[in-house]
Amino acid sequence: MLLMRDPIHDTVDASDAQPAGLSTPLMPAREEHPKAADCRFVIVAPTYDHAPSLDAVLTQLDALGLPVIVVDDGSRDGTAELLRGWTLGGSSRRIVVRHASNRGKAGALRSGFAEAESRGFTHAATIDTDGQHNPADLGCLLEASLLNTSAIVIGARPDRVPGYPWPGRFGRAVSNLLIRIECGVRVFDSQSGMRIYPLRTVSSLGCRTGRYAFESEVLVRAGWAGVSVLERPISCTYHPPGGRVSHFRLGRDTLRGLTMHAGLLGRALLRWCGIGNRYRIRR
């Protein structure tokens, strides 16, 4: 059963990242990737009305010694004031990007990635600010990224955690399966927000989906482009101090995700039928 799948694995060579039945292999993305010594990492932390947990998350992120870009996605609680105090700490490594109104997680990530690239960073480590992640777990993802600078690295959460909502477990299993069907990439946690993205690669994939569906779409398009996807196990809690605030809306966001997968599956089916096999799947 998919939910009980055990191994956390490295996924996937370009030759593996294609649905069965393709007569022409998908071509890998032709990108120049930095050597490990040339990589510049930054943490991108999108946040929306997470003031109760944000201060503790920022304290732990500062301890990692990496620059941090926080994207305030139109928060209406005390987030803006908290971030003003955080940046007044005097460190140039503390950067805040503000949205006047909420754009959703995909919009916040895109703003953070654009800011990171404009400052010369090559890789973005992303983390949710609702308190479910342990920032110290980013260390093992950074190590994996340094060994394969062109890969997307996912922090895979356990699939059995106290307080893990059943809609989340079910949606994760369905998303894992659909991604496998659409592009051949096997992942254990397609919905984890803790990741490392090579910025030039992600910007070249042409992802279009908004809000939470972005994190699944980017994996499908990475598979089509021959980009490796790696996973490393991380911890997770659904009972952080101060409580956890989730902005995932079961009906609305599930419908968006299914619509996105329907479009991607349609593209994959065209290739299974041999239509457009001479052309690389892109945008």
Image (cartoon, grey):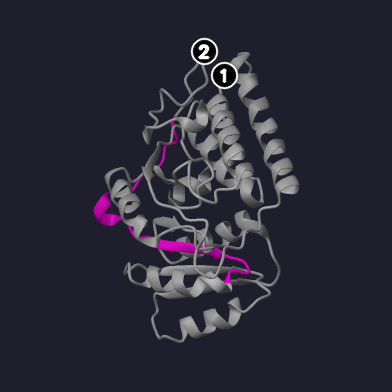
Q: Position of residue 92 (x, y in %)?
A: 40, 79
Outermost front residue: 162
Q: Considering only vertical position in the picture, is 268 above or below 51?
A: above
Tell me, yes or no, whether the highlighted magenta stretch contains residue 178.
Answer: no
Label 2 with label 1: CB-CB less than 8 Å: yes
Q: Residue at x 36, y 55 (%)?
A: 137
Outermost left residue: 37
Q: Looking at numbered disc 2 in the image, what kind of residue is underneath it? A: Ser
Q: Where is mark 2, residue-wise? A: 23
Residue 282 is at least partly visible in this image: no
* Label 2 or label 1, whichever comes before in sequence order: 2
Q: Looking at numbered disc 1 in the image, what kind of residue is underneath it? A: Asn
Q: Position of residue 80 (x, y in %)?
A: 60, 79
Instruction: Give, as a single range, the part of the protein colored magenta.
Output: 28-50
Q: Considering only vertical position in the picture, is 143 above or below 258?
A: below
Tell me, yes or no, whether the highlighted magenta stretch contains residue 49.
Answer: yes
Crowd class of label 2 (few under 14; some 14 to 19; many from 20; radius 10 Å): few
**Circle 1: element type:** loop
Is residue 252 toward the left or the right of residue 237 in the image?
A: right
Q: Where is mark 1, residue-wise? A: 277
Q: Residue at x 54, y 33 (%)?
A: 176
| Quarter assignment of residue 37 | bottom left
Q: Considering only vertical position in the picture, is 240 above or below 198?
A: below
